[in-house]
Each structure stands twice: as structure tokens, then as C-alpha cells.
Image (cartoon, rainbow, N blue to C red):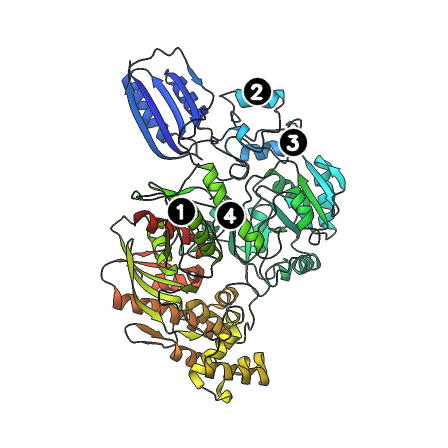
Amino acid sequence: MPRYRLRVFGSVQGVGFRPFVYRLATEMGLKGFVLNDPSGVLMEVEGPKEVLDRFLVRLREEKPPLAHLFGMELEVLPEKGYSSFEIRKSGEEGKKEVFVLPDVATCEECLAEVFDPSNRRYRYPFTNCTNCGPRFSIILRLPYDRRNTTMAAFEMCERCRAEYENPADRRFHAQPNACPECGPWLELWDAAGQKLAERDGALRRAVELLKEGKVLAVKGLGGFHLVCDATNEEAVRLLRERKRRGEKPFAVMFRDLDQLREYAETDPFEEALLLSPESPIVLVRRREGSPLAPSVAPRLKKVGAFLPYTPLHHLLLRDFGGPLVMTSANLSDEPIVKDNGEALERLAGLADYLLVHNRPIANRVDDSVVRAIGGRRIFIRRSRGFAPMPITLPFRLRRRVLAVGGHKKSVVAIAWEDKVVLSQHVGDLDTVKAREFFEEAVNTLKRLYEFEEEVVVCDLHPRYASTAWAERYSREAGKPLIKVQHHFAHALSLMADAGLGEDGALLAATWDGTGYGTDGTVWGGEFLRATYSGFERLARLRPLRLLGGDRAVKEPRRVAFAVCFDLFGEDLSKYPEEVLKSFGPREAELALSVLKRGINSPLASSAGRLFDAAAALLGILSVSSYEGQSGSILEDLYDPSVRDFYPFGFDGFEVDWRPLFEALIGDRSPLEVRVSRFVNALAQVVKTVFDRKWEGERLGLTGGVFQNKPLTERVLELLKGREVLLHQKVPPGDGGLALGQAVFAGLT
């Protein structure tokens, strides 16, 4: 009888793959063994050839739902004479090629146990099995075995050990397996770290405090959340003030889908996203008259909603009864807090009480954020539930790459052969803590995969923290450094996301806030013809002045004033009242002087700034509280029944927005109509340029501006019948840059 030696690569550890192989082999009467090793899963099976061949087919067709197979090596060897089939101890030696699975939401079977009074895991907040629970957040090294996770310190009791060692049990080799007798437990602390209650008593007391309007720091899967009653305006406003959050919206966790439907309007696709094993935050439309506190999402008609994804969350939401604000526990622009001591130190002024547990978090990981656009899942932030799952390429890279992404919404990546592994969301690199987390994310990926890059790649921008780090690191390590233009990296990211082959080409609208151009100016409204080896800039938006430089990015009124200066020169009587009011006479005169002399007013061909200008000219927003606020407010005012649009010019290279803004300023229609005409005009710009420049390539939309739902859907409508690529695996914004950088450096 022949013996098949199979090596399976992919996300195959921690998903019940070995017990599945064991059950399948024994059911089919095959002999041999299966084990985990750093490359994935290794098995040898022997028996009649026709049975072995059926085994190969069933291995792929019946694999566990969480398993992802990226490759399989098969050797046919002589019979060895195995007497049975067994699961062997994991091997430690070998190349690290297995992929770490993301954290997975609680499965229905575990949830049923948590709420079953007769079950030994009744109300146990750390219940999990092979099909659910923590993965990336607890792993220290590969292979994925308990001794290589933060669960190593918890010695399993007799009953948990019996489950863990029984191949027929769904908890067979579930590495975080635990129960109230032997596993992690909760404690409730006051703000000084004094223990007030423990275990289920801590949970029940925490719920009472939330009902009293208190703000709690709750340790979850990948870090702490700051939590309060989402219907209590005073509590939400207090949290917003303490966190220095401005008007940036909070995410809200709902008990279940039925409760969410009371507060928001969802369609079946959005509900499918909410219920998926990844359990991301999903942007949905807030129901009119919803009892959510106004301060949850000021000025917006949408809310970031998600459902419980750990037993602790389920218990909290069930006991509390109503929805809870659940936002990352940090000060603005700093990484999420993950350790108990760190929480006491950094959350002292933010939370009244802390609900902690004693299972250490190895890797901090924020919640993912998605939205439905054009019937597709579009990432705003790719993190928990998705990272660090690899992106598989349709070609092989020529060298091993470390890509460090951009400065905003930072994500780093390592890439080799046909895989790109992206880190969790790191965030903006404006603070020391954020830059420390950036290095932590780089080191985590390199440690897990024992990865040594041959080349480092970064953005072209000379002032990005990631670029400065890459320059220093590559110099010290003696590694070559490649710099990739920002918008070209966006286009490459979309090509790789869509699975275009090595000879693929794309005509892409690459629209965002800012990116450093090859000519040293600020880009952001580009049309590129891209291949994996280079790009041609076919068209752009007319550059506008950024009055005050970087200050204009945070103050839409400055962009609007510069637009008016372009239109009306020094005649302030023609400037809209909304703009003049936001400046005042003296500041307006000073702004005129600055623009006339060209001081600190760099040019930017930025689509994102056009949204800022429109918001200020319409009297909606003078100073931004967070990046993208203008676009977020404008999209809520969009009326799809409005079909006309403001005019614009196009000379074959430059799109002239001056006719657009002149028409907008003179329009006296209702606000929703003016907003809709503005958005429709931008969609028409994309169609016009694509029509003029198309030479048979695929069309694509990339860059953070295309996270705007009405704009993107209007473009898709105008281009109906033509293939238009959107991002579906990584964000269209800067969270996807590292993917584009990696494929360019790996193919160069």
C-alpha cells in the first residue's frame, strides 16, 4: 500500500485541522499521523490508493470553516506499516510558513454554554473552542501551541485537559481552553487599582456602575475599550471630553441584531457583515428619532455599529440591556491600551473604574471598521478578525520585503513568494507612543515568521515618520531602501487586491487628502495609468492653495478662502458670507495678504480638500475635528434623486474646478440639492477623464476619498457596463499602502 506524505500550508493551526484529519483518516480506515510544525500541518497516511485519493479530495472539500489552505505538497512513499492513526506532538524545527489566524467571534455552541445554568461554563467570560476565540491577540511564537501563547501560565484542570486531549471533542487542542476552575478571571478595580470585586461579582457590579452613568475601561480581546451607556448623553459627553475626542464618532455595541434594528436601518448585506465571524464595526444609517445620545456621532446620520464578539461582551450587553459605547481605550492618536498596569497609568483620567482580567494580551489589536459600498465590503480599517491573514498574490515576488506604509492609518507588511502579511491597524504616527507601536508591529511580524527582509520600502514623503524610520533602519541594517510614490502605491495596492497578474495594467483615479508627488508638490486628485513596474500621470485636479500649509488640512475654512481668492481675487465683497464669518475682518485681510505674497500656501491637487472647501462654502464646517469629517457630513446630506451636477472644465490634463465652485456659491437651492450636485460633479469628473484616457485597461478607484459611499456608488452607476475595480481585501486609504509598496519592491 502507498504512503502519502502531505504538508499543508496556510491558516491551519488553531482551527481544528488536526482533529479533522484524525477523524477523517480513522473513518476511512487509514493509518499514519498528523502534527503541527512551523510550516503548517504535516501528515502521513497510508492505505489503498483509491482510498488515499478520496482522502485528498475530502481534505479540501470538508476542511474546518476557519481553515484557509494556501498550498499542499504531496510525496508518494513506500508503505511504512503504521498500526493506527495518531496525533503527534508538534515539531519546532523548520521554516516558519504557517499563517497566524485572526481572533474569531464566539461561536453559537460556546454562547449556548455561557447562558446555560446547568453548564460548568455558565457565565464564564473566557469560554472558547477550536472554532472561536482569541488567536493573534495571544500568540507569542509559532507553532500555535498553548506553550507559545499567553495561556501558558494557566494549568488546565482535569476536565479541561480531558477535552483538550480528546480528538472527538470540539475543544481538542483549543489552545485558549479554560473554565472557571482553571482559567482567567475578572476583577473590578477603582481608578487607583484597588480591587472591588472579582469573577462574576465583578461583572455584575460593572453593569450596575454603567447603569449609574459611569465610564468603565473594559479589557477585551486585543486591548481595552472605554465603555458607557450609549443612550446617556451626560455619560457620552463626559467620555468625549475626557478622551479629547472632539466630534469624532464613537462605535456602539448592540446586544444583538434585533436590538440594532431598533436604533439603525440595515440592509441584508450589512447584517451579514455584522454577523460574520470577524464581527467588524459596520457603518450603518441611524434610525430617525433613535434614542442614542447625540454625542455618540455629532452631526452624522450614521453610526458605527457592532455586535458582541466575546463571551464577556455578550454578558455585559445582556446584563446591561441597552447599547453601549465601546471605543478604543486611549488618548486621541495613541495606540489602544492592552496591559493592566498600562491601563492604570494611561487611563487614570478617562475611566471611573476598570474591569480587567489576568489573561495577558500579546498583540494589541483594534476593532476593524467596514462599510457596504456598491454591494461590496469596503474596509475603513483592517484589524481584528482580519489581520494578520495574508493577501495571496497571483505571482511570486523575487525577494523578501519589509514595507512600512505611510504616516496616517499606518499598517506595515512583510512579503515573500506569493504572500503579503499585513499587520493590524497601527494608526497615525504623530505621537511617540504611536511610533513605538509601529516598531512593535514590525518586530511582531518579523518574530512570528522569523522573517529577514532583503529590501525595505517606504513612502516618498520626506517627513513621514515611517520614511524616517525606514531610512535609519535600512542604513543600520545595510539593506537597500526603495521609495514609492504615494498614489502609485495606492494603484498597486488595488491591482494586488483585485488579483491582477504581473502583466496587469490599470487606469486608476487615485483620490485622497495628501500625498508627496514626484515633482515635490502635494498630490491627491490624480489619474494614473499603472503597471507593476511604473506609472504615467494622465490627469489631475487643478491645484488649490493650502492657506497656512498643514493648518489648512484641519481648517476647511482656509481651503474655502483660497478657492474664493482663486475665483474673486482681492474683492472680499464677492466672498460668501459663510467664509467671511468664519474668519472675521482682520483675519480675512491677513489671509489675503498671505495668499497675494504666496507665503506658506503650497499648491495641492487634492480631492479631499475639495470636500473641505465645499463644506466650508456651504456653511457646514469651518474647522475639522477629525480627518475626513467634511466628506462624512456631506455624504449624509446627499440625495440620490438629484441627477444634475455643477459644471467643470477639462483641457486634457487638468480638471478645472473653478466653474464648479462658482456655480455652488451662486446656487440658492436647498442644502441637500447643492451637496448632491457637488458630489455628482466629482463623479462626472471621474467618468469624463476615464472616457478620454481609456485604452482598454481595467478601471479602478483607490485612495481614501473613495470610502465615500455616494461618490463611489455614483461613479459605478455612471460607468455601468464597464469593469471598475474597488478594494475589497485592504482599505482604499492609507491602510492599504503597504500592500502596494510590497509588490513593487518585490518585483523590482
Q: Check the image and report above or below for 167 versus 464.
A: above
Indicate the secondary structure of the residue bearing disc 4.
helix
Q: Nearer the viewer, mark 3 or mark 1?
A: 1
The disc placed on residue 739 is none
Q: Nearer the viewer, residue 714 or 432?
A: 432
Q: Which residue is mark 1?
A: 478
Residue flagged by tag 3: what amino acid is it?
Tyr
Q: Nearer the viewer, mark 4 or mark 2?
A: 4
Q: Is residue 178 left or right of residue 12?
A: right
Residue 101 is at least partly visible in this image: no
Q: Which residue is mark 2?
A: 162
Label 1 CA crowd tier, 10 Å (few <14, some 14–19, many 20+): few
Residue flagged by tag 2: what amino acid is it?
Ala
Upstream in sequence: badge 3 or badge 1: 3
Residue 226 at what x, y percent from top left?
64, 50
Q: Nearer the viewer, residue 737 or 496?
A: 737
Indicate the secondary structure of the residue bearing disc 2.
helix
Residue 265 at what x, y percent from top left?
53, 56
Q: Nearer the viewer, mark 3 or mark 4?
A: 4
Indicate the quadrant where residue 9 lies. Answer: top left
Q: Nearer the viewer, residue 433 or 588?
A: 433
Indicate the secondary structure of the residue bearing disc 1.
loop
Q: Which residue is mark 4?
A: 439
- Structural distance between the alpha carbons of marks 3 and 1: 56 Å
Q: Nearer the viewer, mark 3 or mark 2?
A: 2
